[in-house]
């Protein structure tokens, strides 16, 4: 069967999708030839792309488990993407079976995929919404039913904000989201960086994603740290202070061993809203 015959209604497979490319990096099957070709161009100059994707996935799972262990029972996973195993609700509900997870994405194929993935799952829901339109998310019936804004919530922005340019004011948007959440809520975020990376690899990434449905905007350590302004950053591991870390290091038993080439392509952090 051809890709066109397999494509769900409303899904454009003539342009690469970052969500489907991410799925391909992770070894998934919810992608098309256009996505694989684009991802292979990235991998040609960034052979650690798969390692980076898995390091980011590991940060998501470890941070969600930590949040659940520290009493969080409500999660909003913005830019949830396509991965099919060890998802946010799996990690959260393994610790706290009563945890509730609201998945959010604006990619139509993610909505199709989520409908199948979440069928029969308790404590989960999916909303099609854009990060840039918080009112649409918070006013959605599923959000009002799933999330109690009077109680702490974990807002997850994992490998998402590097698809948001500065002109869309991601810093202001995140402050706006956190302003709506109760004290004791958390922000867990990872974002791509070009710090100390080869110009050729960075250029390839930018060129490939510029031709996809979302261009990449990588940021420095200082710029990623700024996303946590006004929040109390959690030390990423026992050897660190209250600071961001590479994605492989956060929550790792041995952060030195976790500091892989792929890990260094993104910074991450978890921070608490204290008031």
Image (tube, helix red, strand yellow):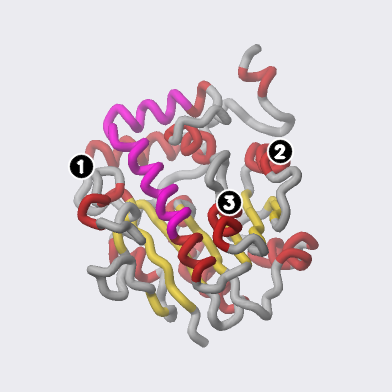
Quadrant for residue 246, please give it. Answer: bottom left
Up/down of 17 relative to 169, above or below: above
Dot label at residue 116? 2
Residue 90 tag number = 3
- Marks 3/1: CA distance? 36 Å
Which element type, helix, strand or loop, lies under badge 2?
Answer: helix
- Please give the label number shown on residue 198: 1
Q: Disc 2 to disc 3, how far (Cα)?
A: 15 Å
For the point 54% across and 80% down, the residue is 184
Compared across the picture, whether 205 is left or right of 16 comes to: left
Image point (23%, 68%), residue name: 239
Of mark 3 and mark 1, the one earlier in the sequence is 3
> What's the magenta region?
36-62
| Quadrant housing the N terminus | top right
Disc 3 packing (10 Å; few <14; some 14–19; many ≥20)? some
What is the magenta segment's predominant secondary structure?
helix
């Amino acid at each position: 069967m051809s890709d066109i015959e397999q494509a769900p209604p409303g899904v454009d497979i003539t342009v690469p999708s970052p969500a489907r490319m991410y799925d391909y990096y992770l070894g998934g099957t919810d992608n098309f030839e256009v996505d694989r070709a684009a991802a292979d161009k990235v991998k040609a100059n960034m052979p650690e792309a798969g390692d980076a994707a898995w390091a980011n996935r590991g940060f998501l799972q470890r941070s969600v488990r930590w949040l659940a262990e520290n009493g969080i029972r409500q999660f909003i996973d913005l830019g949830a993407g396509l991965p099919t195993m060890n998802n946010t609700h799996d990690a959260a509900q393994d610790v706290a079976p009563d945890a509730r997870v609201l998945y959010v994405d604006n990619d139509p194929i993610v909505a199709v995929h989520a409908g199948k993935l979440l069928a029969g799952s308790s404590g989960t829901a999916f909303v099609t919404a854009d990060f840039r339109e918080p009112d649409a998310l918070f006013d959605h019936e599923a959000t009002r039913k799933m999330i109690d804004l009077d109680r702490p919530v974990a807002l997850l922005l994992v490998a998402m904000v590097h698809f948001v340019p500065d002109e869309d004011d991601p810093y202001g948007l995140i402050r706006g989201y956190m302003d709506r959440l109760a004290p004791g809520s958390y922000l867990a975020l990872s974002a791509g960086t070009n710090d100390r990376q080869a110009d050729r690899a960075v250029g390839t990434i930018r060129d490939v994603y510029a031709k996809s449905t979302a261009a990449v905007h990588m940021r420095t350590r200082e710029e990623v740290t700024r996303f946590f302004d006004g929040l109390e950053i959690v030390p990423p591991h026992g050897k660190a202070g209250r600071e961001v870390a590479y994605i492989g290091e956060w929550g790792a038993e041995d952060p030195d061993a976790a500091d892989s080439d792929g890990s260094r392509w993104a910074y991450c952090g978890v921070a608490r809203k204290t008031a």
